[in-house]
Amino acid sequence: MSRTKRNLIPLLLVVAALAGLLMTTAFAEGDTEYVSNFFAQPLSLLPPVLAIVLALITKEVYTSLFLGCLVGGFLYANFNPVLAVTSVYDTIASKVADNMGIVVFLVSLGFIVVLMNRSGGSKAYGDWAKKVIKTRRGALLATMILALVLGVDDYFNNLTTGNVMRPVTDGHQISRAKLAYMIDSTAAPVCIMMPISSWAAAVSGVAESMEGVSGLQLFISAIPWNYYAILTIFTLIVLAVFDEDFGPMKVHEDNAKRGDIYTTPERPFEGADDESKNSTNGKVVDLVIPVVVLIISCVSGLLFTGGFFTPDSGTYMNVLDAFANCSAASGLMYGSFIVVIFCFIYFLVIRRSMSFVQVTDCIAEGFKVMVPAILILTFAWTISGVTNDLLGAKYFVEHFMQAYAKSLANLLPAVIFVVSVFLAFATGTSWGTFGILIPIVVATFGVDAGTILTIGLGACLAGAVCGDHCSPISDTTILASTGAQCYHLNHVKTQLPYALTVAAVSFVNYILAGLIQNVVINLIIAFASMFAVLMILRATIGKDKVNARAAAK
């Protein structure tokens, strides 16, 4: 036996002994309930924060998210490596299973998008839209209007609006980062203010769980106090009308005007719309009809899961109640199945523009297009599960709020907004955030508190959307990047200055709202303050342009 092999034997024995010791330690507790030493402690928020920081530094999203999950697993396991790894992978399996409907919807949508490209429908629509929408301003406003119309669900909104408007914005030399920002900053703010939406259903469902509270009425009364959502849409309109940008977005837009819609070396979607494989006989209806069917079938799917089409004791449920009871994941999955079947019939039988083999090839291609989004979503769901379910971060935030809430009186809406922003940013979920905070807000103010309760609820919902916009691990942020086919971290970095600007103005207005408590006066102040900040930024940008031209001379 060689010396090398003899030296390996003791090493292998040591490794085997350590493995046995670790396995014994991992399962020594038997049936006793396991509780981590870090449960509901400040370090329970470390995994998402670490993942976000690593992603921004390294520009490597997948590894950063996985490392964040792994660190959370080690905290949960009190640094037992066997329990840490098994807990993380069990969470991955559980979260993917819980969200499999969204995965199926993504794959189906990928198939539909590739099919519309291969049929020539996307190109035909883009050529038509260039003739109708003649300016960058028009393209931006058209993108926002479509997102407003599709306000029933943010997942559906981000993906559909991005895929429909991408040929238009590309034709007007609008960067992919700007497109991602437009659809992301319209989808969630619209959904959180739309009484007929999956978001309204989620908020109402949380509120209804508390005695003496009408969830839908509370949601509607909080809409005019949702400053972040209102001012974000207002900001989009102002920026589109003046065609101005600031921060990293300005770099992307300046490059797009010179022909580079990606800016950075990382451009994973470049070539995804390769026209060499596409038909030249496509028509506008090859895109419009599948999209219309997609909208109708997905909305119908949401209503179906809410019980709208299945009468209870002979009585049909109304639309609002159906949305309140719907399952977004299942509804979108069912709706996408109908569209897939329709597309086969439409392109093979009605249009006869593609062969059976060409259509089926689009299934695999569509899956490939959606792999990056599915992978990031998987890790984002996992890190949320590790943070909230295994480490109990939600309980840490709940205890913090209960400890300091009542002593802050009328400043509480502003505090709620900040806490909600931070929690949504760290966990990457707006739904999870208001699911945690709404019961605390209602319990703190009381069911009969009146205006101050609705202000607090508005601040909670606004902060959840804001933190969701800022977070790289947010599922809606990931889907906005996917819909726009934009490198994910480019979207995060370019959107962040806009989101923080609106958040700062919203924070000040929540302080004023707690003191004034008049919906009309406070809204006027909010709009005026936001417009003033945007005009100051615009003046600063104009001054920089003048100085740059002077330096060039």
Image: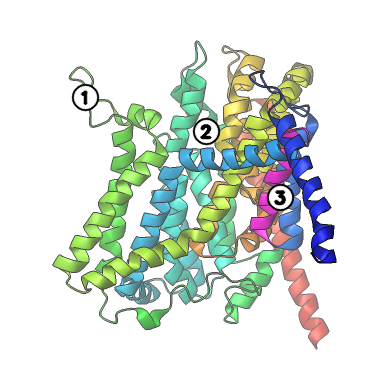
Frontmost residue, 73 versus 281: 73
Query: Few, some or many C-alpha atoms within 10 Å of disc 2 (few <14, some 14-19, many ≥20)?
Result: many
Marks 3/1 in contact by CB < 8 Å: the verdict is: no
Mark 3 = which residue?
Answer: 67
* N-terminal-most mark, 2 or 1: 2
The amino acid at mark 1 is Pro
What secondary structure is found at the residue carrying circle 2? helix
* Label disc, if present, on residue 223 of the rendered structure: 2
Q: Which corner quadrant holds the N terminus?
A: bottom right
Residue tagged 1: 311
Q: Nearer the viewer, mark 3 or mark 1?
A: 3
Of the pair 518 and 65, the residue shown nearer to us:
65
Whether residue 445 is visible to the viewer of this picture, yes or no, is yes
Q: CA distance from mark 3 to mark 2?
A: 38 Å
Query: Percent position (x, y) of residue 125?
Result: 34, 71
Of residues 55 and 367, which is closer to you in this image? Answer: 367
> In 3D space, how far apart are the residues under numbered discs 3 and 1 (Cα atoms)?
48 Å
Magenta residues span: 60-79
For image coordinates 22% across by 69% down, the residue present is: 356
